[in-house]
């Protein structure tokens, strides 16, 4: 018994037809084990319907009988994707269990002879191992037997997922556009039907031109819109519209509208004419934006710029400004008076040419660093005066930032400091000479003490101690003396940690420090450096004789701590011999320490004799360490 749908076809015809994958499956399927039975036993009307379906190019399937046995064509197999060919010959209820209820309802309707059309139906189908949302358009028609009774349903399946998604995206886009346009009074849209001379627009556009929104929505002649344009702009706007229509290019125009109350509104209008097959413009759509606020801001900015230039030109300093990238685009009148260069000749990077050749690289490096980091710019350099002389100048600049913190401009000044610089250098020479003479006095004192000790051997020990104390005073003086115009601290101040490091160098062992500073550092000026040096010297000398520094493994840790109303220094010795509190402390060194702390620095000193080593706590007022703090703390008379 033949198993083919085309038993009477010639072999070559059958071979050609069975090149279709679905038809090949139909012929090779084991129908003997299927509820439909072998093909020759099928009703002729069913076989005819299957033949028609197999040659169709759109997805089609036949649901046969009460179980809806599934037979489909190649296009449907492509729709089924990963479920094919497993579901071929199965009940549609088992083939698509995720749509079981829907398919059962359509089987029932089909067996009742009903025709069904479903234009849009969403399914969650598992075609490739993961559920996906599929939109389909479905049409069901009954397949009737020779007796006129339904054998099943022929289903035409259209996958319309791409179309639905595109429509949804379009709807969302149109909704966003509508919300954007209707949610602001700054934007209006128009569409000009050129052939009929009817301009239709939205409410915002009509409001800009002081027209009735309802009439404008139905369409008005373009002349009604042109009538609202400022008389000084109307001819230009008409020429720009005509030019765009003639060339077919984009239209862009900025002009004024005169409202019914006499107020003026600035408009930016843009659009593009649409040209038909005959080469004529048939539509001209576009948008308009109210830019009145921007014009007001620009006017205010121009007025502010004018005020700035007037103010800058009246200042005795040279004033300049740059763009965020450092391009110099403005100098005030003082700059040109000082340098004597032609106006505009130092714009861009031409400013560097008026610097002294030895200062140009340094000035560029400093300026680039400020541009890259946004840090304030400050440098001293020599600037060529109009007389040809190079004069010392202080250059400073700060960035101007917007609300987001972005730099929008740099504003800078140049101040002539030539005379003050020369005076400062003269003062420095005097200070250095004085410092040199003071050090010579220390050296003479040490020489006198050494000669005296030779004449009085019994005072040698005292002389050695005195020389060491004078050495400490010399180190303190050298530490806070003027360090040069560009170096050191500007008011003779230095760091306590640096003073300690300098004084304790003699106690280092093989290059390793045995006295270390930790904690909060403090500023020390020349007034406090002397008593502090004597204090540290006495503590170190005693430690070297009796304490931690007398042993090779002993160390001293000096800690600094900023308290609320004082600065505390802790001297702690470890690794030395065991110490015990002496019965009495009354030597010259002890009195010198007390005088330095409690007398000169108005502080408090406390000794604690711990088994592991001596601990000394020194508590000082904040203003005892430097002169500037002391001056700030004094009440106004």
Image: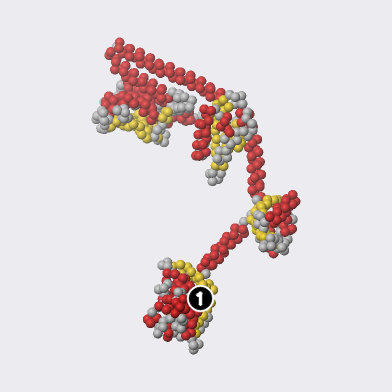
Q: Quadrant of the N terminus?
A: bottom left
Q: Which residue position is annotated with label 1? A: 56
- Examine the rendering and report whether any part of residue 72 can be seen: no
Residue placed farthest to the bottom in the image?
147
Observer-nearest of 350 and 180: 350
Up-down relation of residue 290 to residue 405 (above or below): below
Colour convention: secondary structure
Up-down relation of residue 594 to residue 239 (above or below): above
Disc 1 residue crowd, few under 14, some 14–19, many 20+, Cα 10 Å: few
Residue 617 percent location from the top left of the image: 34, 31
Up-down relation of residue 253 to residue 319 (above or below): below
Residue at 29% of width from left, 17% of height from top?
Answer: 461
Q: Secondary structure at mark 1?
A: loop
Observer-nearest of 327 and 69: 69
Residue 560 percent location from the top left of the image: 37, 33
Residue at 41% of width from left, 22% of height from top?
Answer: 477
Q: Is residue 326 left or right of residue 21?
A: right
Residue 535 percent location from the top left of the image: 35, 25
- Examine the rendering and report whether any part of residue 235 can be seen: yes
Residue at 67% of width from left, 60% of height from top?
Answer: 275
Residue 564 percent location from the top left of the image: 41, 36
Q: Quadrant of residue 465?
A: top left
């Amino acid at each position: 018994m033949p198993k083919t749908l085309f038993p009477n076809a010639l072999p070559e015809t059958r071979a050609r037809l069975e090149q279709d994958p679905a038809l090949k499956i139909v012929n090779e399927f084991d129908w003997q084990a299927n509820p439909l039975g072998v093909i020759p036993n099928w009703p002729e009307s069913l076989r005819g319907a299957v033949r028609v379906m197999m040659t169709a190019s759109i997805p089609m399937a036949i649901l046969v009988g009460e179980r809806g046995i599934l037979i489909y064509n190649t296009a449907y197999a492509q729709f089924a994707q990963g479920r094919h060919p497993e579901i071929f010959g199965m009940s549609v209820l088992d083939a698509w269990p995720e749509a079981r209820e829907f398919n059962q309802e359509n089987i029932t309707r089909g067996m009742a002879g009903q025709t069904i059309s479903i234009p849009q139906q969403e399914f969650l189908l598992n075609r490739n191992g993961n559920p996906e949302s599929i939109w389909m358009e479905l049409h069901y028609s009954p397949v009737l037997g020779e007796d006129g009774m339904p054998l099943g349903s022929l289903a035409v399946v259209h996958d319309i997922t791409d179309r639905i998604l595109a429509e949804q995206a379009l709807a969302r886009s149109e909704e966003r556009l509508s919300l954007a346009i209707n949610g602001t009074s700054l934007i209006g849209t128009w569409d000009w039907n050129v052939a009929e001379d009817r301009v239709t627009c939205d409410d915002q556009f009509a409001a800009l031109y002081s027209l009735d929104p309802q009439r404008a929505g139905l369409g008005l002649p373009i002349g009604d819109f042109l009538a609202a344009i400022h008389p000084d702009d109307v001819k230009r706007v008409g020429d720009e519209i005509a030019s765009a229509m003639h060339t077919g290019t984009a239209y862009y125009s900025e002009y004024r509208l005169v409202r019914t109350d006499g107020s003026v509104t600035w408009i930016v209008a843009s659009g593009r004419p649409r040209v038909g097959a005959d080469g004529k413009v048939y539509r001209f759509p576009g948008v308009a934006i109210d830019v009145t606020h921007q014009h007001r801001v620009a006017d205010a900015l121009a007025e502010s710029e004018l005020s700035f230039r007037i103010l800058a030109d009246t200042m005795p300093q040279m004033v300049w400004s740059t763009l965020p990238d450092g391009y110099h685009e403005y100098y005030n009148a003082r700059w040109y008076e000082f340098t004597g260069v032609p106006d505009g000749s130092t714009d861009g990077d031409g400013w560097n040419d008026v610097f002294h050749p030895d200062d140009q690289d340094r000035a560029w490096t400093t300026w680039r660093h400020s541009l890259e980091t946004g840090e304030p710019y400050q440098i001293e350099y020599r600037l060529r005066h109009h007389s040809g002389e190079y004069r010392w100048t202080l250059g400073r600049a700060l960035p101007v930032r917007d609300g987001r913190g972005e730099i929008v401009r740099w504003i800078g000044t140049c101040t002539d400091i030539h005379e003050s610089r020369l005076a400062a250098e003269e003062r420095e020479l005097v200070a250095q000479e004085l410092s040199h003479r003071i050090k010579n006095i220390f050296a003479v004192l040490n020489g006198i003490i050494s000669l005296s000790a030779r004449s009085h051997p019994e005072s040698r020990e005292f002389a050695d101690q005195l020389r060491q104390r004078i050495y400490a005073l010399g180190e303190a003086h050298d530490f806070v003396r003027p360090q040069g115009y560009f170096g050191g601290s500007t008011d003779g101040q230095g760091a306590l940690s640096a003073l300690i490091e300098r004084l304790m160098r003699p106690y280092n062992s093989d290059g390793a420090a045995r006295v270390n500073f930790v904690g909060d550092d403090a500023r020390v000026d020349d007034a406090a450096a002397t008593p502090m040096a004597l204090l540290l010297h006495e503590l170190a000398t005693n430690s070297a004789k009796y304490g931690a520094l007398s042993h090779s493994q002993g160390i001293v840790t000096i800690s600094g701590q900023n308290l609320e109303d004082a600065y505390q220094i802790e001297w702690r010795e470890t690794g030395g011999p065991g110490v015990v509190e002496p019965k009495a402390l009354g030597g010259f060194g002890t009195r010198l320490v007390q005088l330095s702390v409690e007398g000169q620095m108005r502080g408090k000193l406390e000794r604690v004799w711990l088994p592991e080593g001596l601990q000394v706590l020194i508590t000082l007022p904040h203003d005892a360490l430097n002169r500037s703090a002391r001056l700030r703390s004094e009440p106004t008379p």
